[in-house]
Image (cartoon, grey):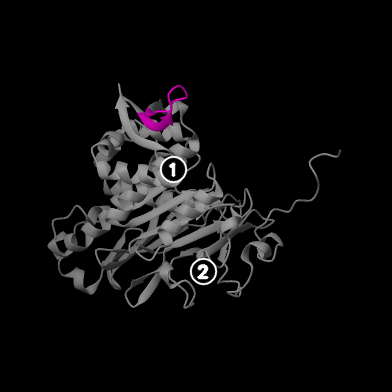
Amino acid sequence: MLISFRFKNFRSFLDETFINMKAVTYKELPDHLIPFDNQKLIKTLAVYGPNSSGKSNLFFAFASFHSLIFWQLFPSQASSKNRFINLLQLNSMDRIIPFQSEDTKELPTEMEISFLSNNRIYEYGFSMCSQKIIKEHLTVDHHLVFSRTEKELSYGRFYEKCMRSKSGIRPQDTRLFCSILVSLDVPELTVIMKPFEKFFSSKIFYYFDILEPLQILGNTMMDGLLFKIMGNPEAIEFSLSQLRKLGVPVEDIIVDNGIPKLGFLTKSRSNGQLFVKYMDITEISSGTLKNLFMFLKIYELSQNGGILMVDSISSAFHPAVTKFIVDSFQQESNKNVQLIFSTHDISILNNQQFRRDEVAFVDMNEYGESSLYTLADIKVRSDASFSKDYLLGKYGAVPLVKDTIFCI
């Protein structure tokens, strides 16, 4: 579970920016909360804002942070890195890209995450400049494990003793020290680093519209994930059942000569009998494909817990479908899954759908700098008309439409 993510000097975000999943002490919509450590986390965060305001950069920040950690924790998987593309393997996300300005080119990029894994609270972060690590730290349950400043390294009191035999280990400019800790045969470290690894390997899922559904499907097949899915009938039936709830008459999915096909229940015009018509991926709508893969990810998340991050969730979706997906995350029975997404869909922007700490906005100023804030940050009343006030410009983060495209 994500508690918070903080970053500074990344792409269009120059100033310190927080994605904070800690709930504000509001009384509304208590089913939207997950208890942890005498506190509560929100289950969903909806991000609104005009085009080119930096919404996608918010997700790129998290994906870049995740990518850097993932490939250093699991270098053995790097051999497949150029074989296919996915969210953690896009070139634009493999590097930490700072805000582009002559005034800020020497400033470091800072990133820090706080999360729950195996009932422990982790806080981990680093600072980088020119792709070199200048600071890094890790705490577990509020106890320092290690901190570094360039090549100077220190351990917390509990871990200092167990690391005395490893005193010759020194940090490297381009290698995260957490990736060294996971490789050490030190029982006191293993017990805390295994949940750390698990979070970054299997608790974070993405869906970005910059990857077309067919490309995602092709990449999934090349990775062998599709055939893994085909061996999991529960995941398939869950996904198909969700599609049927949305009025899509799907019956099953097969792989025919290496090509996945969806079977749709269809009525014959000649005799009125029902039969299953199979269609390959080139014949299926992008919305149906997007739904299918999103529900497969949601199923895996529901089994193991984690976070789904979706850039532009309402693209290719009817508003009723977007609401259906958001509702599924917000239901009371959900205890371990979070959804963070961007959208332009104001049909769900109301106080029956979201708490004030579940609605965020990204806006950009005249200097090309993005900022993130929530309805809670700007002290909006719980009975406010969120969508109406947003369109009126009361919250900012709306496009400044100054004229018509053409005159008639």
Element under disc 2? loop
Q: Residues at badges 2 and 1 in contact (C-beta under 8 Å)? A: no
Say if residue 176 shows up in the picture: no
Element under disc 1? helix
Q: Quadrant of the C terminus?
A: top right
Kind of residue sitting beneath label 2: Arg
Say if residue 207 shows up in the picture: yes
Give the left or right position of residue 3, taking residue 358 as reference.
Answer: left
- Using the image as rendered, state which of residue 316 and residue 50 is in the foreground: 316
The crowding category of the residue bearing disc 1, from other C-alpha atoms within 10 Å (few below 14, some 14 to 19, many at least 20), is many
Kind of residue sitting beneath label 1: Asn
Start and end of the magenta stretch?
A: 261-276
| Residue 52 - label | none
Residue on which disc 2 sits: 355
The quarter of the picture where residue 168 lies is bottom left
**Principal SS element in the magenta part?**
strand
- Using the image as rendered, state which of residue 53 and residue 231 is in the foreground: 231
Q: Quadrant of the N terminus?
A: bottom left
- Using the image as rendered, state which of residue 291 and residue 201 is in the foreground: 291
Q: CA distance from mark 2 to mark 1?
A: 25 Å
The magenta stretch spans residue 104 = no
Residue on which disc 1 sits: 291
